Amino acid sequence: MALALKASLSPSSSPPSSLQRSRARAAVAVATPGRPVGARALAAASVDPAVVMPTARRLAVRARAAATLLAPAPADKSGVSVAKAMSQARHKGKTAFIPYITAGDPDLATTAEALRLLDTIGADVIEVGLPFSDPYADGPVIQASAARALSAGVTTDAVMAMLKEVTPELSCPVVIFSYFNPIARRGKGRFTAAAREAGVRGLIVPDLPYIETSVLRNEAIQNDIELVLLTTPSTKAGMMNEITIASEGFVYLVSINGVTGARPDVNPRVKDLLKEIKQVTNKAVVVGFGISTPDHIRLVAQWGADGVIIGSAMVKQLGEADSPREGLKRLEVYARSLKDALSGGSTIGASWGDRPGSPMSWQGTSPV
């Protein structure tokens, strides 16, 4: 904190009046950590400059403590952490619904509307994919989606600006899914700081090995970003234990080895993997990759998954529609069918492509 507040600290001073206490609270609220307090801010807070001491470290510590106690809670809903959202779903006996969409496909305005729509439908967490030129862990659907977004000129800065506008409107947290290259180019600290400024609460980096996550994890912690780590069917037991300890928000169980892609069935090993992970952690365990139909969702929920991630099938609705408006309509119908499956609705046991009026077939879809 650039300036520290001193409000009637002298032993000979009389007790502060209610007005002085009000002004002290205002000054503390203005003097946020890491941001210098200028004359305009002080004037707006109606604080006498005589009560501000710019260099006393001990007062800076007191001011930070006061800020924690006196600063009002954020008014926006994006303050819900990923771990909190997962905890709320588990408390209600629900399997969390976590859809994935690519930022900027077909455009950022549609992405913003899709976020609002998915939140309204009841998403517990939303993953937003940051488009990257070499998404080698993804199948053709998301690869094509990222290419369309990049061709349209979508940048990391533009995505962050869009999220900063939308996240305060959402009741669920947003998690960015990004390959490591865009993070490294910007700098780990700057990237996580920008994400937090945009209202993002979590980060998934699929191509960063666990043994190389320490620096990014530290930067994420500094910026109140939950770094979600992944474990796969080929992860050794000892490493899996370490990953579950370090992962924040939830533990991401990748159901298959290899890239995302269409699969008729869920890998049966997921059932045993869920049991193994839950023996060593109380954290929520979420299954992704290969989850795309209501039957898939019902099955992994019965196996004990705390949440399911559906990606490419979501992306397909928006990216391959005739227009953004049509894409949003398709997304709504599809997302509601999956939400119904998690809620025990009538879509369970039916293939989406077989339903009357279905906007798409299961063929060619692949989750993230």
Image (cartoon, rainbow, N blue to C red):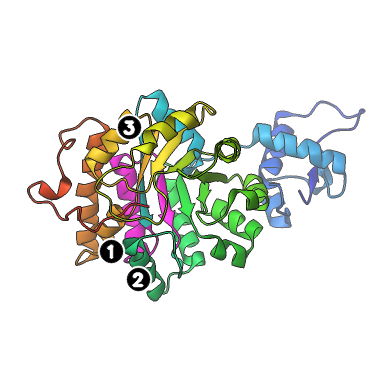
Mark 2 sits on what residue? 148
Based on the picture, tell me whether residue 104 belongs to the magenta stretch.
yes
Q: Is residue 208 above or below residue 98?
A: below
Q: From which residue to which does the magenta span run?
A: 102-130
Residue 73 is at least partly visible in this image: no
Question: Dot 3: what SS?
Answer: helix
Q: Nearer the viewer, residue 149 or 363?
A: 363
Side (left or right) of 197 relative to 52:
left
Residue bearing mark 1: 319
Q: In this figure, which residue is indicated by the disc labeled 3?
A: 301
Residue 194: quadrant of the picture: bottom right
The residue shown at (24%, 64%) is: 320
- Work out whether 285 lies above or below 117: above
**Where 274 sits versus 111, above or below?**
above
Q: How many labels, in total?
A: 3
Labels 1 & 2 near each other (Cβ < 8 A): yes
User: Which residue type carries mark 1?
Assistant: Gly
